[in-house]
Image: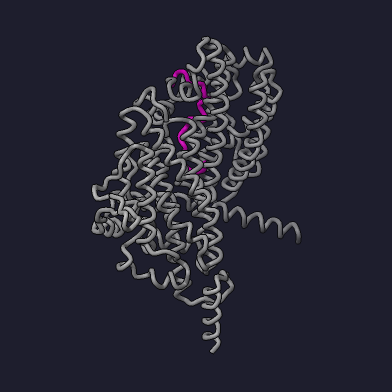
Amino acid sequence: MTSPLINYTLHLADNALILGHRNSEWTGHGPVLEQDIAISNIALDLIGQARNFYQYAAQLINRSTNQPNTATEDTVAYLRDAHDFKNCLLVEQTNGDWAKTILKQFYFSAYQFYLFQRLRDSKDETLAAIAEKSLKEVTYHLRWSSEWAIRLGDGTEESHARMTNAVDDLWMFAGEMFVAADYEIACANKGEAVDVVLLKSDWLQKVKAIFNEATLPVPQHSWMQSGGKEGRHTEHLGYILAEMQFMQRAYPGSTW
Amino acid sequence: MQAFDEGKIFLDKISREIKIEPQDWMPEQYRKTLIRQMSQHAHSEIVGMLPEGNWITRAPSLKRKAILIAKVQDEAGHGLYLYSAAETLNITREEMIGQLHAGKAKYSSIFNYPTLTWADIGAIGWLVDGAAIMNQVPLCRCSYGPYARAMIRICKEESFHQRQGFDILFTLSNGTGAQKKMAQDAINRWWWPSIMMFGPNDDASPHTKQSMDWKIKRFTNDELRQKFIDVCAEQVKVLRLTLPDEKLKWNDERKHYDFGDIDWEEFRNVVNGNGPCNKERMDARIRAHKEGEWVREAAAAHAEKIKLRQQKAVA
C-alpha cells in the first residue's frame, strides 16, 4: 500500500495539514482582529490543500490495495501514527510568539511557492492541478508573511529582537526542505515530483532579500536537523496528533 | 430653537422609515444606546470565537475542521464590521475594547458557558446562532443606517452557521449511541441559556420601550423568545431528540408553545460575572490583546519609518 507516489503525496499533504493546524491555534487569539482573520485564512487554505492531496493519496491507496473506499482523506489524516507522518520538522514547531509564527510561515511559503511553480509541470496530472490551484493562495501567503517579516524586523527594538530569536530558533529546521527523501527522488526521476535540491538557491535568495529589507542577519551555521520526511519527528508532533486525532480514535467508525 | 427643529427632523425621519446616517443630528441618548448595543454586539462576536475555537484543533474530520475555522473566522469578520459601524458614532475600536477589558461593556452571556464535547459545536450553531438570528434579522431594518447595513451581511452568514450547526446535530442523531447521547447532552446544556439570550421579560426590560420608539428594536424580548421556541420545538423533532423542558407543550388557543419557567437567578448571576467561564473568556481576550501589543507597536513604527523615508525621498 505504499509506493513512492503515495508517500510523496502524503508528504505534501502532511506539510499542509500540520502547518494549517498550527495556524488555526491562533484563531481567536491573534494580535489584532485583521491578522486573526488573515492567519485563520491561511490555515483554511492549507487545510484545503491538505484535503486535495489526501483525497488523491486515498485514491492511490485504494487502487493499490484493490479495496475501494477503504482509505479516505480522514483515515489517512486521523489514523496514521506519528512515524507515518512525512511532514518537514519545520511545520510542526510550536507557534511561539507572532514573530516565530510569521517566520515559520515565511520559510514554508517561500518553499511552497518555488515548489508549486515547478510541480505545475508534473507528469502526474492531479499533482499538477493541485499545485496550479494552490499557487494562487501560496503567492498571497508569501506576500503576507514577507511583509510581516519586514515589518517586525524593521519595526521596534523589541520586534527586531524577537525576529532575531525566531531566526535562530527555526534556521536549523529549514534545510530539511531541500534534502530529498527516497520517495522524492524516485518520483522526481519519473517526472512526477520536483527535485527539491533545485529549489534551494531560489529560496535562499528570497530569504536574503527579505531579511535585507527586514534588517535581519542571515544565519551562517549550516548544521540542519532532518528526519521528518521519513517519519522521525520532534516531540511536538505527538501532541499535535493526540489532539487532532482524538475524536477519530475515541469513536472509531463513526460518521461526523 | 435649532435643537427643537433637529429633534423634529430626527423623529420625522424615524416615523417615515428614513435611515439615520452618521452625519445626521441625533439625540445623545440614541447615540449612547446604539454604542452600547453595537459594541456589545461586536464584543459578543469576538468573545464568541473562544468557545467554538476550543474545538478547532479537535474537530473530528477535515471537512468539519475547515468549516469550523471558516465559521469562527466569519465571527471575527462580524466583529470587524460592527466595530467599524460603531466607530461612525464617534468612538474608537480601542476605546470599545478598553471598555470590554475593564468590565464596563458587556457581551452576550451565552459565551460564558463551556464547550465540553464536539456536539456543543452543533448546539451552538443550531441554538445560539439560531437565537442570534431571531434577534438580528429585525436589526436589518434598524433605524441607524450603518448598523442596519452591517446586519444584512451578518445575517446571511449567520443563517449558514445555523444550518451547519443543525447539520452537525443531525449527523450525530443519526449516528452511534455515543453520538446521540453527546447530541442530547449538548442540547440539554445549551437550551435554557439560549432562550435567556433574548434578555429579561418585557416587564423587566428597561430599555425596550425607548428602543422600539426609535426603531432600533422592532420586537420585544418576549415576542422574539416565543418565536424562537416555536421554531425549535418543531426542529428538534427532526433530530428525534428532545428539549429539556417538561412544560413545553403546544397551546392551540395561543397558537404557540407554552414553556417552563426560566431561571432568571442563573441569568443574573452569569451576566454579573458568575458564569462557569466568565473569567477564562475575559482572561483570554486580555491576554491576546496584551501579547499583541508589541506587534501593533512594531507595525505602527514600521509604517512611520516608511512614511519618513518617502518624505525624505520627495525632499
- As drawn, is B98 to the left or to the right of A38? left
- One can see residue A176 in this view: no
Magenta residues, as a range? Answer: A82-99
> Hey, which residue is sitting farthest bottom in the picture?
B1
Q: Is residue B188 above or below residue A156?
A: above
**Closer to us: A22 or A180:** A22
Q: Position of residue A234 (x, y in %)?
A: 44, 25
Q: Is residue B128 magenta?
A: no
Count of labels in the image:
0
Q: Residue at x 32, y 45 (%)?
A: B114
**In the picture provided, is A185 more to the left or to the right than A250?**
right
Residue B73 or B188: which is nearer the viewer? B188
Residue B299: image location, x then y, percent: 57, 52
Q: Quadrant of the C terminus of chain B?
A: bottom right
Direction right: furthest residue: B314
Q: Give the x, y percent position of residue A101.
A: 51, 39
Q: Along the line of sight, which residue is nearer the eye, B126 or A125?
A: B126
Residue at 43% from the left image edge and 27% from the top image edge:
A237
Q: Nearer the viewer, residue B123 or A251?
A: B123
Q: Which image quadrant is residue B25 in?
A: bottom right
Kindly tell me whether residue B154 is visible in this rendering: yes
Name which residue lies at 44% across and 38% down.
B167
Q: How is the image coloured?
A: one colour
Identify the residue at the far front of this view.
B253
Residue at 31% x, 38% y: name it.
B184
Quarter of the image holding residue A48?
Answer: top right
Task: Specify whether residue A96 is painted magenta.
Answer: yes
